[in-house]
Image (cartoon, grey):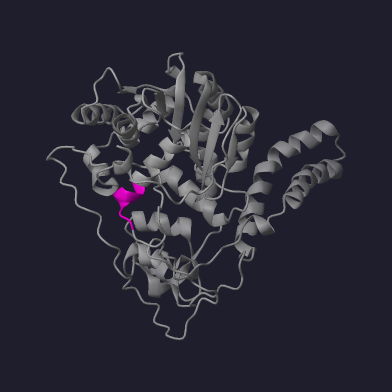
Amino acid sequence: MGIDIGPDFPFKPTPAAVPSSFKVEKPEYHPGVKITSSPAIHNPPLPADGPGNRNFSNKLLIFLLLLAPNYLAWKLGGGLKTTLFFAALTTVPVLLVFWRIASSISPPINERVRCPGLPVEHYLTFHKPADRARYQGPHKVPMETFMRKYFDGDADFNGDALEVLEYRHDWASFRFTWELFRYILVNFASDVLTHSRSQDESQVRDHYDRGDDFYAWFLGPRMVYTAGIISDVGKEESLEQLQDNKLAIVCEKVALKPGESLLDIGCGWGTLAKFASVNYEANVTGITLGRNQTAWGNETLRRAGVPDSQSNIFCMDYRDIPEGKYDKITCLEMAEHVGIFKITNFLRQCYDLLEDDGVMFLQIAGIRQSWQYEDLVWGLFMNRYVFPGADASTPLHTTSPSVSTLGGRSRASTPSAFITLPRSGAGTEIGSTTRTRSPQSMA
């Protein structure tokens, strides 16, 4: 499915992957575990797992949270009010210290993996003498600290960024820093808890309306900001092919038919709307808060010969979607902007918008129960620098009960959960799908 977007965006085909030129300079090194490879999936040279939930004790944390205020109240001879007073004072400090220590001393999940053991300066260059003295040899730099220093121009990669990051477990730690705690308490917590209309509008538009050309250069012709899907592990596919696979699978999973109405919540630049309109002759309504995305999406629909009587993109908050009924609803990695405290109401709204035999396809990114501290650090990185206000660190198991309550089914086999929410209660369980027909065969 090609997208004609005009001469101002000279897209180039996705090039084939270039073999890594970064060397660990230890010929005898082996990670200690078998490394598989296929044309479609280039596995990392250091398949390391860090510490995480396996060694995290909720029971110990709860014990310490109860112990601190009760002990202080007992020492002062106080009662319940004194205990509650000290609980208000000690809860946050106990949480911070516990997470700090746990993230620093917990062993990795897979201890069989061996790191090269090269000094930090082999991978990174710090420009300030104090940083060079602190982070050298075996003394790893916290990833959150390196992020800030890199963005401030105080540190650089000694090679291609992606290649050096493949060996991150050899030079970085994922312990929680005090700056990370400060960000969680001051910024992240308020963003996640609030999710007001004005906040969502400001954050979404500041992110997505910074310029279509900015996104075009790394999203490519499809202008799709969500994960693609591999159709054949025996061959390497371009970014465009992976996205076409994804679009086709979404339409197949909801069993989209000609003439049916499809509501795409968080439609972005309208790529799925165009795909469904052209290949399935569906009547698509796309919803986005991005002004640029709205204009782009409607323009590409018209260029594809899709009349406004069939499909349109509208700029509005999901909470303002007019009452009506749709045969199918899709929502691809937009629910992260809804917030964990509003997700149930959002799903209820979607349920009410479905026809009696309608189906919803929901893809949401988050953290599985087998989380690692690295997952949390990267999730907070995304919230701070990429998607302000998005709950990319939300545990997926907190969403599943909301889906189940409305009769849907889900399976989180990857960091993204694919969920169907059937209006009739007869759902389909969706996991990681690997094969689909080509878009051309369905046109």
How far across and how far down the image is residue 325, in percent? 46, 17
User: What residue is shown at x 86% (from left), y 34% (from top)?
Assistant: 79
Q: Is residue 240 in the magenta section?
A: yes
Nearer to the camera, 237 or 402:
237
Residue placed most toward the observer, 178 or 52: 52
Please identify the quadrant where the C terminus is shown.
top left
x, y percent for residue 407: 62, 29
Q: Which residue is farthest top?
A: 323
Residue 189 in view here: no
Residue 245, compared with residue 238, is above or below; it is above
Judge whether residue 282 is colored magenta: no
- Vertical comparison of 47 with 272: above or below: below
In the displayed structure, does residue 91 sit left or right of residue 249?
right
Horizontal side of 295 relative to 319 (left or right) equals left
Secondary structure mainly formed by the magenta segment: helix
Give percent across and percent down for residue 375: 53, 53
The N terminus lies in quadrant: top left
Looking at the rendering, the stretch of residues picked out in magenta corresponds to 237-243
Q: Which of 171 and 371 is in front in this view?
A: 371
